[in-house]
Amino acid sequence: MSNDIETKSFKTLLHESFKSDDTEEWLDKYFTRPIGLFFARIWYKLGVTPNTITILSIFLGVAAGVMFAFPDLTHNIIGVILLAFANFCDSTDGQLARLTNQKSMKGRCLDGFAGDVWFVAIYLAIIIRLFNVPMPGTELRWGIWIFVLCAVSGILCHSPQSSLADYYRQIHLLLLKGKEGSELDSYESEHTKAMAVKGKKGAFWDYQFHSNYQHYCKSQERRTPAFQRLRAKATEKFGTLEKLPEPLKKEFITGSRPLMKYTNILTFNSRAITIYITCLLGIPWLYPILEITVGECLYIYMHREHEKLCKHIIAEIEKL
């Protein structure tokens, strides 16, 4: 596959680098992914690994956050450019990994960690920028309240929203493309891996990785009881979830497909565009408020509809 990067046409490689048409956003298909692939071919010729590109994206994302801490337009425009390049790197590392068969769970988790670092830097920038600034329409300074607002937005809203959106996307990909096309993991498998390396010489970082990742998986599973019952029921009756009978699999995909637009809204692009607009307009306080209000409403709806879909498929299985 790696040699194909040099021999296949750009259009063919671009299509092969998509996760699926169902889960790719319009902006990614026609803007981010083409630019990412352009850089991926360059990085490949230079022998740069996907994880190295991910690390580069961390520095770019943090630098973008620093720029958003300034109230002037020049710094904010630089921040927009830096965050856009961080996102290109994020797209590039995934495309390069898929096209060169260098996909790994550690690479995926590093990718997720990079995105978290970007947004931590951005939240801190908003806090620093607004701490001594009066609230809109008042003479009261934001002070500690901007810290509270960003903490609620980032910890209680952004993190759960993006992790569940990613989980639903991976479930959809599993039933659409099979195990090879999905990165759906479980607490049980990660816990087993963590215990297998615990205390072993030279395995400290492997243990830390699997130990932390198992908690991420557990959080996703705890919030999706109906899907966990569906997964258990399908495993009991058919061996694995992806071995659902074709009619049921198609029914699930049909029901899940409309929810993919919500998973996209709750991941990067929509958030980044909102950050760009609010910072450039000098109203960065609006970003965390939108995450708490609009983002949370979309999260609740997406969760409710997915759980409802899972309960329906369980009922269909029980009829067989």
Image: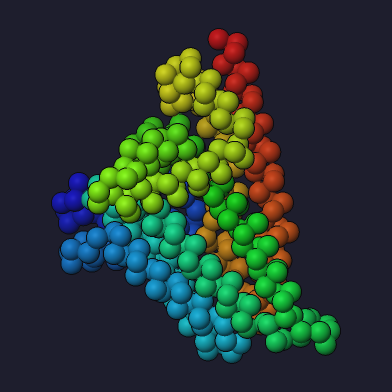
Between 106 and 73, the one lying in front of the other is 106
Relative side of 64 to 95, left or right: right
Q: In this view, does 127 lie above or below 112?
A: below
Q: Would you say residue 245 is visible in this rendering?
A: no
- 81 to 199, vertically: above or below: below
Number of callouts:
0
Residue 139: in sight, yes or no? yes
Residue 12, horizontal then vertical, whole percent: 28, 50
Residue 128's spot in the image, x, y percent?
61, 82
Q: What residue is rendered at 44% in x and 59% in y?
A: 113
**Percent position (x, y) of residue 272?**
55, 67
Q: Residue at position x 21%, y 61% from top?
A: 44
- Using the image as rendered, state which of residue 260 and residue 207 is in the foreground: 207
Residue 93 lies in quadrant: bottom left
Q: Residue at horizontal 21%, vertical 54%?
A: 5
Which one is nearer the viewer's eye here, 195 or 215?
195
x and y, in percent, of residue 186 in the image:
46, 37
Q: In which quarter of the image is the C terminus?
A: top right
Q: Judge left or right: residue 182 versus residue 76.
A: left
Above or below: residue 70 compared with residue 39:
below
Q: Dividing the picture into quarters, in which one does residue 256 lie?
A: top right
- Image point (41%, 74%), residue name: 60
Taking the image as shown, residue 85 lies to the left or right of residue 303, namely left
Q: Which residue of the protein is positioned furthest toward the right in this rendering?
A: 138
In the displayed image of the protein, which residue is found farthest to the top?
A: 320
* Quadrant hosting residue 133: bottom right
